[in-house]
Amino acid sequence: MTKTILVFLLCAASLTAQAALDPVQVRQLAAEDSSDKVAAIQQLTQTADPDAVRVLKAMAEDSLFLAGEKAVIINGGKAFDAASGAAIGMPAETESVTVNNRIRGELANALAALKLFDADAGVRLASAQKLQSSVSPAMAPLLARALEKEIDARIKALLTLAYAQANLGNTDPAARLAAVKALAETSSPTIRSVLLPLTEKAGEPDDKVRYEAIAAVKAIDGRLAIAENLGRVFSGLSLGSILLLAALGLAITYGVMGIINMAHGELLMVGAYAAYGMQTLFRAYLPAYIDWYLPAAIPVAFFAAALVGVVMERTVIRWLYGRTLETLLATWGISLVLIQAARVLFGAQNVEVANPSWMSGGIEVMPNLMLPWNRIIIVGFALFVLTLVWVLMNRTRLGMFVRAVTQNRPMAGCVGVPTARIDTMAFALGAGIAGLGGVALSQISNVGPDMGQGYIVDSFMVVVVGGVGQLAGAVWAALGLGIFSKLLEGWAGAVIAKISILVCIIIFIQKRPQGIFALKGRFVE
Amino acid sequence: MRRPLTLRILDTLDRKAWIALAVFLALALVAVPLLHLAVPEDSAFHVSTYVITLIGKIMCYALVAVAMDLIWGYGGILSLGHGLFFALGGYAFGMYLMRQIGRDGSYGADLPDFMVFLDWKEIPWFWSGSDSFLWVAILVVVVPALVAFIFGYFAFRSRIKGVYFSIITQALTYAAMLLFFRNETGFGGNNGFTDFKRVLGFSITSPETRLVLFGLTAVMLAMTLVFASWLVKSKFGRVLTAIRDAESRVMFIGYNPLWYKLTIWVISAVLCGIAGALYVPQVGIINPSEMSPANSIEIAIWVAVGGRGTLIGPVIGAFVVNLAKSWFTVSFPEYWLFFLGLLFIVVTLMLPQGLVGLWKKIMAKKGAEAC
């Protein structure tokens, strides 16, 4: 009795496993005519059967053969019945099934669609994402079935979209209307372009659907505009952090010490070349840890730039305290020497500094809003440097001395502050921070001898707008200028934006010659 | 009692200076043309076209340096945007030269080539009348003056001075450079104006035209020097120097520094504009790079090398630095920036009075030894 049941169960099991596909359909895969093959592939796809995947895959790999009137799969010297999947004896005579390009394309589509029924959610997700851009009306029933089975909310949302897109070609206006309504909820440029033909009479005969499509495109446009503006604010934020990094050092040397350092941009360049140097060293000696060259470059850049700063201060700037215009000219001379030195040492061409792998890619916030990792990391890095500077200036002895010398040099000297050494150290600190900014710059822009020149005007603007002697001013001015110029750029183009920013600053200086955050108190020149 | 004008003009310079000026003019107006045209080319005394162009160019620079010295050496205001005024004058005159090309351009059209390239159908409004020499001559003076007046009025009114002023002028010329780089603003974009053919109907490359331009530049430079020395010795010049040394005190006495600064600022800009207009036909090109901040700051170093607060200093500085530049860029191009950079450093550290100051020091030492 038990034996009978067991046999029966085995039979049933083998039946469900092996007789799932219709042998006639499978046979049609090996038909003479391409159109017949395509029809067979589409029918097989509609079954959404895992077995269909096996057969279609075999066909795509050219291991489907015709033996007599039966389609067989020959794989690794063994033959299987294509419809049931059961192993059979090697047939004596086989005929290969031609797979031309049209069939191959059809197979690829079918296999991709069948992945929607894969057991692995990850595979299903990838497949659903792929379908967003290439969905054909013929897939609508298949998608409907996949939608029924799907349990994962994210995949389900994607499938709904794909289903709606497929339904846009439906002959029933009601189905189209529903599809348009569903698509109006999205915010992707591809769906907008899919909907666009429906807003015209030639593309959509039904008035109701057409009006709905016009409304949908409008709604999508609105959301796209929001995303675009958010993107601009973000790139403004990242530009602001770059400006902040460039201007922080300047806020110390100019704002606190009153030195106009026209070579500040070249100190950025020193930092960027330090990053390049570390990259070269890591490539040559530690290729396995190449991704770590950037963290290693941070202290190197800081000390390299600080060293240049010390040399500058000791040899030139020391003799020019209190004569700002002369400092300006002398530091300009230093900047020319540094630029030429970089040309001689590294060549006049830009050098290539690659992003470490952990900085590539980004976070997709919306379909058309991508926040690249390198920008995010730079914003974070700027925050880190800002905190560092703030702590140094407000919580350490060195910072206290620097502030004391700024406020009253003779008195500071009288109570025992080594003013000359403090000057050197403060200048070195400002230079080192410029070096840190250079490391950040090396990740998003070209590294070359002339790279510093472009930042000098901008960073002085930040300091001038922010107000002298103020870190907070520099922060607000940098972020404000960054965001404002990126928003203007989107609206009026890069050059006009730059010019109007400069004009705005000139007007602003009229009103508040001391910057946003003027030092309060009795300061006379 | 006022003395006759001729006497007052004569008073502006001392005897030695007048003699030097006469020698300079004689060289530029008689000796150079003779040596260029009459002496055969293989002779050692022949002055080549290259030399004439080079010296003519440097004389334009010297004019700019004198203008810079008026504002910096006497007014105490360091402008890092004088390249803008120079370029404005140059562009105004350059447009006249473009119109003089006529139909000889590569497109054979009435409009300048770059406008044909942009598919423009007519001359934009701000260039209307640019085919008239007289109107362009007015533009060369009025445009820099107007820009300088508007900018200077607002800057000096809110008492922006020192490095703030320097940096803002730098931003100004930088912004203008970006604007002129654009194709659609009507200034020829990247390439600027070039390929000139004629000026007032004469071929621009003929030796005679070159010599006339050369002579005109020399005369302009000489006249500027006389005018400037009159200006700085006048009451105006004395108040200006006082403002440079102690602005607050001058204000407390009852002068308004605004108008003094503004006047010298506008004069300086106009001189730069004229220099630019003389420069363009001799060099044959004007493009936005003339407005780059680096160019403007180089003007300051000419003045500093020669000696601020003297009028002959800037001329000497312009000649020394630019001759050095043309020698270096031919012989050791890679060392020019090192030299220029070190020049900036050395002059500010060791020669605050420039070469003229050094000369005076040496003479004073000699005089002391003689006693």
Image (cartoon, rainbow, N blue to C red):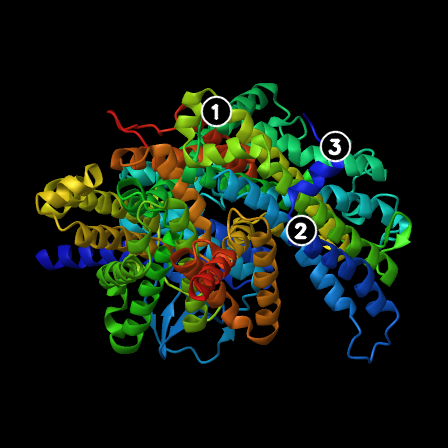
Q: Which residue is mark 3?
A: B4
Q: Nearer the viewer, residue B302 or A371?
A: B302
- Disc 3: host chain: B
Query: Which-is-in-front pick, marks 1 and 3?
Result: 3
Q: Which residue is mark 1?
A: A219
For the residues labelled 1 and 3, the Cα–Cα distance comes to: 82 Å
Residue A15, x across and y down, in percent: 28, 56
Amino acid at the residue labelled 1: Ala
Amino acid at the residue labelled 2: Arg
For the residues labelled 2 and 3, the Cα–Cα distance comes to: 18 Å
Is A375 on the left or on the right of A472, as rendered?
Answer: right
Q: Which residue is mark 2?
A: B15
Would you place residue A153 above or below residue A271 in this image? above
Amino acid at the residue labelled 3: Pro
Q: Quadrant of residue A102?
A: bottom right
Question: Which residue is at a point 53% across and 31% down the rendered structure image?
Answer: B261
Q: Nearer the viewer, residue A334 or B57?
A: B57
For the residues labelled 1 and 2, the Cα–Cα distance comes to: 84 Å
Q: Residues within 10 Å of mark 3 (few under 14, many from 20)?
A: few
Are the residues under badges 1 and 2 in a single subunit?
no
Are the residues under badges 2 and 3 in a single subunit?
yes
Quadrant placement of the C terminus of chain A: top left
Q: Quadrant of residue B180?
A: top right
Would you place residue A48 above or below residue B165 in this image? below
- SS state under label 3: loop
